[in-house]
Amino acid sequence: MSDYNNKTAIITGGGSGIGRQTALSLARKGANVTIADISEEAGEESVRLIEELGRNAIFVKTDVSNVEDVKAYVKKTKETFGSIDMFFNNAGIEGKVTSLADYPEDIFEKVVDINLKGAFYGLKYVIQEMLQNGGGAIVNTASNAALDGSPGVSPYSATKHSIVGLTKTAAGEYASQNIRVNAIAPGPTATNMMDRFTQGSEEVADQVKSGIPANRYGTPEEVANFVTFLLGSDVNFTNGAVYPIDGGITSV
Ligand SMILES: NC(=O)c1ccc[n+]([C@@H]2O[C@H](COP(=O)([O-])OP(=O)(O)OC[C@H]3O[C@@H](n4cnc5c(N)ncnc54)[C@H](O)[C@@H]3O)[C@@H](O)[C@H]2O)c1
């Protein structure tokens, strides 16, 4: 059985949704957790929930698109817990919903800065640390928008496709040094992101669900369970893969 006890995980976007549930899942198994999130209130609340479980967590206020913030969450984690064994490179934004020819350039750049550059900076500085530490496990958050076109969210789809490229490349570069890099491709999942995407409309939500064979959203806990599994040592030969968690979307 994978042993997470006293191992350390960094989770970007750990203040909400998929990131928070993964933080709680790892903490329940005994891991120390660093929550790196742009929202102080949300991040501190995740820390409080972990401490309520009797586990250790710290919050590092982070904008993942700022490389100095990324270096800071790596440094603070090492100083506090001594090592970085697991990394959930998860923070992301959806941007605006509008067709490509009308897409505002400044929002396009913001989505690229957070979803692509933020993920790259995280990989770069965490891998440097893991190399010193004898290895580690990384999961990057892509999306089912990484596997197909997604009308209305071109930069989101493009940046999530780029996560697949980063994942496979990093996996190949570092497999021999005991670092595994996989990605998840969740379908619509019941988090704040999905609420923003549907703007609270039941009708739009039903439309989205009608495109999912399971006819419902996934829960952040269901995604967290799989990420926890991928970060564990039971699956040490799993590397460079992209796993849909989508109620069957990719099957049709
Ligand atoms: N919810 C879905 O349907 C779905 C589907 C596929 C993939 N995803 C991906 O899952 C990941 C998590 O999304 P979620 O659904 O939990 O959304 P969420 O909005 O509930 O959580 C995202 C978290 O990221 C943080 N964040 C945003 N910008 C940041 C930045 N610049 N630096 C650091 N933190 C930042 C937010 O404060 C928030 O806590 C994202 O990468 C998203 O693209 C979500």
Image (tube, grey):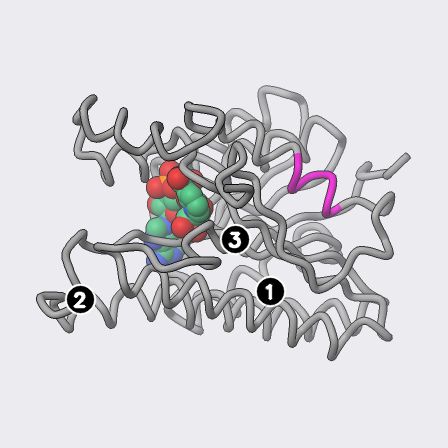
Q: Which residues fall within the magenta stretch?
A: 226-231
Q: In this figure, which residue is indicated by the disc labeled 1?
A: 75
Residue at the spot 59% in from the left edge and 63% down from the top edge: 74
Q: Residues within 10 Å of mark 2 (few under 14, many from 20)?
A: few
Q: Amino acid at mark 3?
A: Thr
Q: Residues within 10 Å of mark 3 (few under 14, many from 20)?
A: many
Q: Earlier in the sequence, mark 2 or mark 1?
A: 1
Label 1–label 3 contact, CB within 8 A: no
Considering every residue shown, the one lying at the far right of the view is 1
Q: Quadrant of the N terminus?
A: top right
Q: Position of residue 26 (x, y in %)?
A: 68, 35
Is residue 72 positioned above or below 42 on the image?
below
Residue at the spot 70% in from the left edge and 26% down from the top edge: 28
Q: Amino acid at mark 1?
A: Lys
User: Dividing the picture into quarters, in which one does residue 211 lie?
Assistant: top left
Judge from the rendering whether residue 39 lies leftward or rightward of residue 160; answer left or right: left
Q: In this figure, which residue is indicated by the disc labeled 3?
A: 141
Distance of label 1 from label 3 (alpha carbons): 22 Å
Q: In this figure, which residue is indicated by the disc labeled 2?
A: 100
